[in-house]
Image: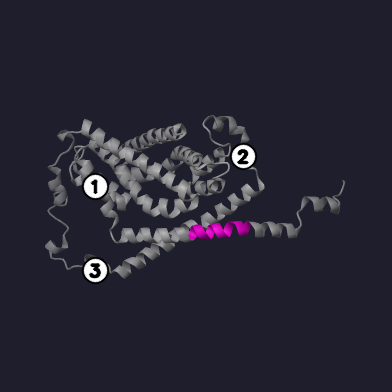
Amino acid sequence: MTSLQPSTLALQIPPTSAIAAETVALLREVIPRLTRITVFIALGVFVANLVVSFGLIQYIAGVAGYLTRPANLPDEVGTAILTTAASTTAGYATLAEYRESGLLDDRATIVAVMINTFFGFVQHVFTYYVPVLIPILGFHTGVLYVSIRAGISLAITIAGVAIGGLVLSSRNVDRSALADLETGHGDGETGDASESGAPPTDDDSPDSPRDRAREAARKTAGTLRRIVPRLAVVYTLVIALITHVDVAALTGVAEPLTAAIGLPGASVAIVAVYSLDTTAGAVAIAPLIGEPFTPRTAVITMLLGGIVSFAVSTFKRSIPFQFGIWGPEFGLKVIAVNTAMKLVFITVAIAGLLLAP
């Protein structure tokens, strides 16, 4: 057997000094960017938590009542839509209560879910898109992407209003069910401590501004603990990849397909990452904006990633959430409608970006 000569080993194993130099160079590239992003995320999430804590986000959703009436839905549904802007789970749970009580039938509930879309998006603007995604993508690309996603959500809401105006009538709404809702579903209990004689609790009085600020800071710290470590790992791997690997050449086999719609070959890898994790996908594409991606092609790539991610997110999040709220049968209908509407309007948005001058 031929033994390896020291000179051969020297060619195969980089010198320690070279490895150290590359590591230092990588850290010099990663740490400043990661620090800047972390600061923006911390500030943005803290302000977002303050907005939610002080109830200011509800004013944004105050227009809900103006949407439910043209859709032939009762004003009470606007309460659920308003609630969605602060808590998606609470908003959906309120709609589920209206459906179970008989106030809304299945058709009216589906329309209400569609109208809910934009107000669910509003919450993510404050808690994710502005504090997290825009700092990662940069102002120009980030605002363009968030604006288009807002437009998609608003289009679904407007479509819900239009469909409700066309297909809903008094047959789809049983206003007599409100009496049961207002009296605890007919059990004679209102649940109001002031009327039942129960002593008031600490929850009856609002927290002080200092307590609300502390709670916002606590939630912010939890968000940072969840996001930043993952962000650091992904960002380091991405920077190392684009430093040592020609990503465009690596995905060059897909160049004919992506070139047909004006996207770089590297978009295939970005779509794959984005479909698994949206934050990781944004981190992956951010260093490539400018070359080979323009802000427009970057946004198109992320929208494509969003389409691919539906299959993943459906199993990871939508099925457990929607089935838990509605049950399997109606939950499957809600998932189908949500997915279909998003696919339609994301496709329209992509076509618009491709055709724009």
- For this orientation, the residue located farthest to the front is 357
Look at the image and say whether residue 137 sits in the magenta stretch. no
Tell me: residue 47, above or below residue 240. below
Look at the image and say whether residue 33 sits in the magenta stretch. yes
The Cα–Cα distance between marks 3 and 1, rounded to whole angstroms, is 32 Å
Residue 97 visible in rendering: no
Check disc 2 and report the residue beneath it.
248
Instruction: Give percent across and percent down for residue 96.
Output: 26, 44
Residue type indicated by callout 3: Asp
Q: Of 314 and 225, which appears nearest the observer?
A: 225
Residue type indicated by callout 1: Val
Considering only order in the chain, which callout, 1 or 2, is on the residue closer to the N terminus?
1
The Cα–Cα distance between marks 2 and 1, rounded to whole angstroms, is 46 Å
Residue 12 visible in rendering: yes
Q: Are marks 3 and 1 in contact (CB under 8 Å)?
A: no
Check disc 1 and report the residue beneath it.
63
Q: Are marks 3 and 2 in contact (CB under 8 Å)?
A: no
In this picture, residue 176 sits left or right of residue 110: left
Mark on residue 331?
none
- Tell me the mark number nearer the camera, choosing from 3 and 1: 1
Residue type indicated by callout 2: Ala
Q: Which residues are magenta?
A: 26-38
Q: Of 178 and 240, which appears nearest the observer?
A: 240
Instruction: Give percent across and percent down for residue 130.
Output: 41, 52
Check disc 3 and report the residue beneath it.
202
In this picture, residue 270 sits left or right of residue 102: right
User: Which secondary structure type mostly characterizes the magenta part of the structure?
Assistant: helix
Q: Of 219 and 174, which appears nearest the observer?
A: 219
Considering only order in the chain, which callout, 1 or 3, is on the residue closer to the N terminus?
1
